[in-house]
Image (cartoon, rainbow, N blue to C red):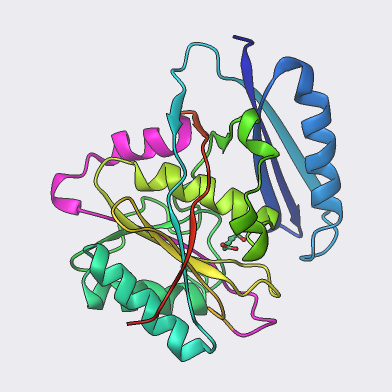
Amino acid sequence: MAELFSVRMRASRGGTHTSGAERIVPDDEIETAAASLISRAMTHENGAPEEIKITVESLAGREILRLKPLRVIIPQAPALHVSHEIAISELVKAGVSEEAAKIALEAIISGASPAGGNMRGAMLVDATTGERLEPDGERGIRARAVDWAKEAETHISPAENELACTTPHFREALALATKAANAPEAVAELCISDDPHYTTGYVASRAFGYCRIASMKETGCRFGGRAFFVHKKNLDIDEYIGYMRKTPVLVNGNVEVLHADNK
Ligand code: PML
């Protein structure tokens, strides 16, 4: 099999992150992947960047983990208060305490970094107490080295089409959530986009899948981010961070999408 490379883009303006994305591709697709990531950075709704960093890194010698995408469930969430209730109840179902779920949700929608803005990566949160465990509150935890397998890229099922699960946001988030759900000591994840006009978020867990929730914030709100909930008691934080940053994951398989009736 051809050697694979991670091609990552991070764009910023005035020191503030504007967009970021990653592809895992064979060597003869590096240039195309880099060009498409640059175009994405330049046209992002967070505004034109002043700086775009592209990192190309060989994944040779690293074992590639192949995972099936989490199952996708879409509840009815017509308004902010309903969507937040659904998110909290999904987190609780997955094993997060209500207190920890509320702490993380509140932090994400009001700026989770110590300076009061968005973090560059995700919060790491003890699922029982809500204690923040990430070593650096600005940088947070970065989930890297994850993409769809090439075979999966062009396959969008009729259900995905019908339920508008075709945005790049969705597909990238589902791949990332699939990786995160398989991390050591992972309990669940909560995500709200930091794009001001993208208000759909999700709660994901290995046991219950990817619950895609509309109206997670007001349109125009610039806050957003992720919380990875873990069991602190058994956590080896270096192992966890190593998995999230370094273990290459390719997601492949049909995306199963279901509408759910709210309980
Ligand atoms: C992000 O902006 O990176 C988060 C995207 C969340 C996508 C939610 C969805 O559309 O399912």
The answer to whether 137 appears left or right of 234 in the picture is right
Image spot of residue 191 (x, y percent): 48, 64
| Quadrant in the picture for residue 210 | bottom left
Q: Residue at x 64, y 54 (%)?
A: 158
Quarter of the picture for ligand 1?
bottom right
Image quadrant holding the C terminus, namely bottom left
| Residue 185 appears in the rendering | yes
Image spot of residue 257 (x, y percent): 50, 58
Up-down relation of residue 111 to residue 40 (above or below): below
| Quadrant in the picture for residue 30 | top right
Q: Nearer the viewer, residue 236 or 213?
A: 213
Q: Residue at x 59, y 58 (%)?
A: 159
Image spot of residue 31 (x, y percent): 82, 26
| Residue 113 appears in the rendering | no
Residue 103 in the magenta stretch? The answer is no
Image spot of residue 111 (x, y percent): 52, 74
Up-down relation of residue 232 to residue 199 (above or below): above
Q: Residue at x 46, y 56 (%)?
A: 122
Q: Where are the magenta residues, as a range?
A: 218-246
The answer to whether 56 appears left or right of 119 in the picture is right
Q: Residue at x 49, y 28 (%)?
A: 248
Image quadrant holding the N terminus, namely top right
Q: Nearer the viewer, residue 116 or 159?
A: 159
Q: Residue furthest left?
A: 233
Up-down relation of residue 197 to residue 173 (above or below): below
Q: How many marks?
A: 0
Up-down relation of residue 94 to residue 64 (above or below): below
